[in-house]
Amino acid sequence: MPQQPTFDVQSALAAMADYPVMLRRLGVIRVIEVDLAGSGIDPADAGPVTVKAKPAWATRLPDAQVDRPAVTVPAYLSPTRFSLFADGRVDAAATKLSVTELDTDSAGTRLLDLARQVVNAERENAAAAAKNPPELPPVSLPNRLSLPSLRNAGICVAQQSRAVDLRERLVSGKDLVSASDDQAVDDARHAVLGHVLDVWDDRTGRWHSLCARRGTYRLPGGTTFTHDDEGPISMAATARDQAEPDDTLYLHQSLVRWTGWSLVAPRPGQPVVTEDEGRVPNAPEGPGLPGFSVGFTAKPGSLPRLRFGVGYRFQLRIVNAAGHVEPLQPTSADFSRAVPAGSAPPAKYLRFEPISSPVVVAQAPMTEGESLETLVIRPDPWPGGIIGSILAPILGTGSTRHLAPPKVNQQLCEEHGGFDNGQGVPDPGRYSLIAQRDAADLAAVGTADPNRAGQRYYSGTTLPVSWLADPISRGFALAGLPGGLVKVAFDPAAGQSWPNVRAARLQLIDGTGTPQWNALLRVLTVPVPRGERREVRLSSYLNNADLALLGHLGWLADSGASASTIAAVRADTAAGQCWQITPYRMLTLVNAVRVPVTAPVLDTVAFVDADEPREPGSHRQDLAVAATVHRPSTGTLTMTATWTDPLDDPIEQAAGPENRVRRAIPQVLAAEGRPLPELTVGYDPDPATGAQVRFTTTQGFGDTRRRVVSYSLTGTTRYMEYFTQRGRVVLRGTTPTQVARAGIAPGTDVVRSLDGTLTYRRTIDYTVDEAQGTIARIPSGTIPNNATVEVALVALPVSRPSSGQPLVVDLPSTARPLPPKPAWIVPTFGWTESSANLGRTRTRARSGGGLRVFLERGWYSSGVGEQLAVVLADGSVSGDDEQLRTIVTRRAADPVTARTATPTEFPTATEFTLAKARVAGIVPAELPERRVSVAAHDVVFDTERKRWACDIVLPPGSQHQPFVSLVLARYQPNSLDGLHLSPVAQVEWVQLAPDRTATAVTELLDLTKVTVTVAGRSPSGTAAAPGQPNAMSVLVQSASGLNPGDLDWTVVGPADGQRLTAAAQPGGTTLWTGTLRLPTSRLLRAYRLVIVEQEQHAGGGRLVYSDVIRL
Amino acid sequence: MPFTETFLCTPLPEGITGTKVRIAVLVSPRLGGDATDDLDNWPDVRDWPDIRPTWQVTLKQGDTEAVLTGTEVVPAAGYDDATWEQLFPHTMQVTPYVPVDRSEARIYSYPVAKVVRFVKELHTRVLTESRTQFPTLEELQDDEVFQALKAALDPINWGELQDLWSDGPKEDADDPFSAFAPLEFLYGPRPGSAPPPLPTDPPVVTNLDPVTGVVGGRTLVTITGENFFQPITVTFGSNLATEVEVVDEQTVKCRSPRAGFDDVEVDVRVTTNEGTSPVSPDAKFTYYVPGPR
């Protein structure tokens, strides 16, 4: 308790200034009467005078030690008036008084605090940005800010520029402070003790004093007396603390604040104890003198009433230092000295206090994910035969809230006239009702919710409004439903009136359509379609008549706003849609579904930039995805990519290449921040695309290869949190315990100790098998063996895969393939055999020009579809273009033979008959500014040789055995532009074999005669045999039939065979013919002909062609 | 100084009846002396209700001055000297009167009506333009009143307020900054909403006292410099000083840490949120090995 100050006689008398009756009783104020008759002072000459009164007596102290300074004070004298001032009232206009019904300190400091939020955030963000290196802004400000609510605090009379006034008086009264001689003051205000405040209201049309009081004075001797007077309100400035007593004053411009009661006597009743006992304010006591005390009550019947909507004027009457004040003229219509002055309308007392949003009370215990402001229904809690096993099942119960008018304090109700009788006077009969309702505790309504600490529910159908409800919260308004604003009245039952208003209920149901009000049950049913959610604003609404009581609308009218603006604001205000007046709270109505209402549909997967599908060398692939989803029920989308990677590492895949199926989840690129494995789907339709979701994904492959990837989507419910199940599970050893037979939604498991204090860590304390729906303890973790733990999880299903076929995208390779490594190259021949004339004519054709290239392993350096290309000149090549010659395939004639035609140096792609593709305009790695064409060939794996093989055929055409220098490269048909071809690999010159067709004809009757013909191109000679075509011989062989295979055959006839006769043909070919005689009939033994063609050289023949024909 | 008594008499006109005027005189006793003492030493005050002075009243109307003898209208029962004696016994301790002159005091005040006006302007504008949705931050930032609120929070802008108050009060100005700045100055932030300290420059060390200490550490060192703001750390070489106490922005006291291996002369550096003081020849501390006792 603060120390009572101790007073001595000087300070006690100063403190008694407020009790003039005591000062007069003690003789501190002495009344002197003077007769002016004959003095020369004429009251009829009305006007200013000065007055001084000087005492004289025989002093107890030596006279020199006693000073009796007399103050000369200006006054006004007339035949009827002798007073300090000509008028006993303060001139409000001259004194710059104003009236406000706002709690100014609170309104101003709360606005400053709002600005402070912004300034603090800006300052912290600026400091972070100024750091080196700059940091991200640590504070994010909301996009929208609400202004702080305004508060009523009665009506305040304030004086502008009051400090100037105070300073003037302090300066001009300076000498009085230490006067020992007579002093004169020019300003009569130095003789003013204070003022009394009167209020005039337009309801009674009378003035009322707010300072009339009945004082009960208790004197030390036990004497008690009462005295009625008007207590002055003093207007002192205060020094804030002891440290600065004299040179710093704090002065509030508010002279006085009237809150509906006397200004000089406390309100009846005890103050509410909100803090520790020592801070309970005590009733005011006397000036700390032993045995002296004083108590005041408002003079009965003197007080006016403070009511919203009533107009008031104020005036100040002057109390002089002797406590004298001129009496009130209650019916005076002279407002010239009042504030507001007579020329202005009276100041209406208007309500700034917001009308809160209705009270919300649940009708049943909260279900999973539900809160007071989130209503949840689950029409399908258990699809597909899922069994919750040991976990508590989810119930599909409905969700209902009681809505009731907000509770307000007694004073606000009183200011609304809620307790007044027909005469506008508070009805004493309602006192017990007020006491009972004011004490009602909203926090004790209904029953405690077992599921939610601190929550309560009321299971009855109508919540009784047992408190003092806001008199102008006329009902609740729900905004944000598709059908528009819904209003339900908190109307009293028939024959009843405020505060006996009735609450209503809001029930969320599964369905479509508009809300329906059932007046009998007082329930508003709001349908929400399956899988959808509604965010609605809940606020109080007002009656049109209430609008006249609102301060904000009063301000708006003062602001000169247009009539249409005022009308619009009034309409919104009555509907409860102006947040400054009827602040709202958000209710969320959820019709939760376990899986999205419809499966997502993958519309397109495309390159973000069709012209540049990937960055050269990139291991990543960005794709633009469009999918159509049921946005309200689909919370997230996950992409799945599936593809097959051909693998050909000679060590890893020793037996041969393998195909491996791969699966991955491409990351979603949000506008900023890190890529995420899933896309968060916005609830509302996109303004441009509606239900379609567009996003970009990125997938890292770790290399630059081409891949053919199938994409699909999975949509996961937005409402997973409402399907959490809980239960108690005993974990024994490391045995998995099945908690959800259908499986566990990834990442939803929470395992805690029974008391809830310990949350166990997955993979450290326990493991989860999401597919099996099991949980198992980890022995090294902190879960004791055989412990019972609480498990919370969401059981599957929670998602739907996209419907329809997956979309396939061929992702190009981003780098050139590696150069091929040819192992060796062999010629290949094509053989065909036919017969005619019942087998007597047998023909065998050999096509030449074939080559088989064997390649070392490590194929697919550019991914799937990699081919072997024969690199060819693209168009004509100038004679001196040696650069290009090194990287393209060339061809030349055999120098040892004479020829009739010279082959072109650069074969064209069309000549390669086995090519799978022929492409021109390819950028070679070695000469990027040049272009080549390719003949791309498939390769096959030769399991025997463990190498890749590629057959290439370049028919020799009119050439005989030309040489070819193959330039080979790997070729990726689907690559970024310019990156199709690997660096080239050269193989040695190889010679292409010529085509030959051999025919043996036997006679029908002459069984030993055979005619042999061989056709084909031949050189026109060699150095050893100029001008001669190649020599063609036929050996006849017969088989005994005793040995299988070639060993059985022995030559019959001449050992080097019979030469055929060559003859040049018109087309440039050569025809070799000859007739043979078999030793015996061809029917008696098995015969065959071995044809051998040799080039004639000095060192002997070179075998060019050999074939065998069975007869 | 002997005991003195001063009776300041202020006449208050209290009405006229015919030719007779009444004056209520407020007598304010002031008791002078050297020290607190018994009331007995001021006998005229002690016995005041018993004293019946004669009154000489001077009235002046225009140039006419009348000096008249007044008649004291004493209540029928006289003054209540019994109560006076009980309230102010002759043994009461009295502290001599000390005049208090506040004519040059600074008067801190804020213009209520102007604050109301600008609150009204802002709320009305928001009611007109953003009544169904909160105003956006941009809209607020563009608002003149909101800008003034922000400016009022910055103490840098308070200079003119201080001038205003030290030169004597002025008429209420008519702009929002002049309305809100004194309010902010007088009330300050509510608990929990105080702004963070203003960003400043990195600290600088200009002097150490003493500049030497034993290798065992725990030498009390006073560091002088600039921009010493919490949170703060002090390092001697690579070791942290202990018991760091920020005396003010220019002074930090701490105890030297134990010397590191090979430490003879080390750099003393101060680190705050704004950075670390640079190495300086004025910020060297030398460790020594104490000699035998």
Image (cartoon, coloured by chain):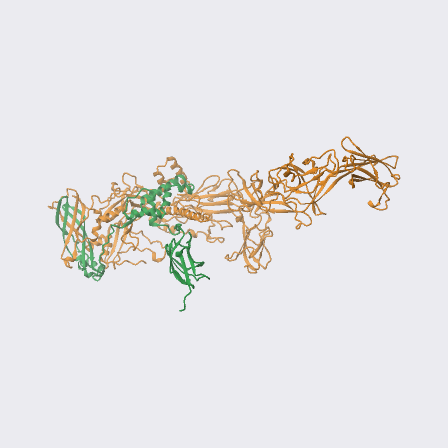
Chain colours: A orange, B green
Q: Nearer the viewer, residue A499 or B177?
A: B177
Q: Give the quarter of the figure containing the N terminus of chain A.
A: bottom left
* Residue A254, visible in the rendered structure: no
In the visual, does B56 lie left or right of B162? left
- Residue found farthest to the bottom: B293
The vertical placement of A433 against A843, above or below, is below
* Residue B157, visible in the rendered structure: yes
- Residue found farthest to the top: A1066
Q: Nearer the viewer, residue A846 or A170?
A: A846
Task: Give the percent coordinates (x, y) of residue A442.
Answer: 42, 51
Marks counted in the figure total: 0
In the visual, does A1071 lie left or right of B94? right
In the visual, does A1043 lie left or right of A606? right
The vertical placement of B190 against A543, above or below, is below
- Residue found farthest to the left: A38
In the visual, does A122 lie left or right of B22? right
Task: Give the percent coordinates (x, y) of residue A758.
Answer: 51, 57
Q: Give the quarter of the figure containing the C terminus of chain A.
A: top right
Task: Give the percent coordinates (x, y) of residue A1103.
Answer: 78, 41
Q: Nearer the viewer, residue A426 or B197?
A: B197
Task: Give the percent coordinates (x, y) of residue A248.
Answer: 28, 51
The image quadrant that residue A294 belongs to is bottom left
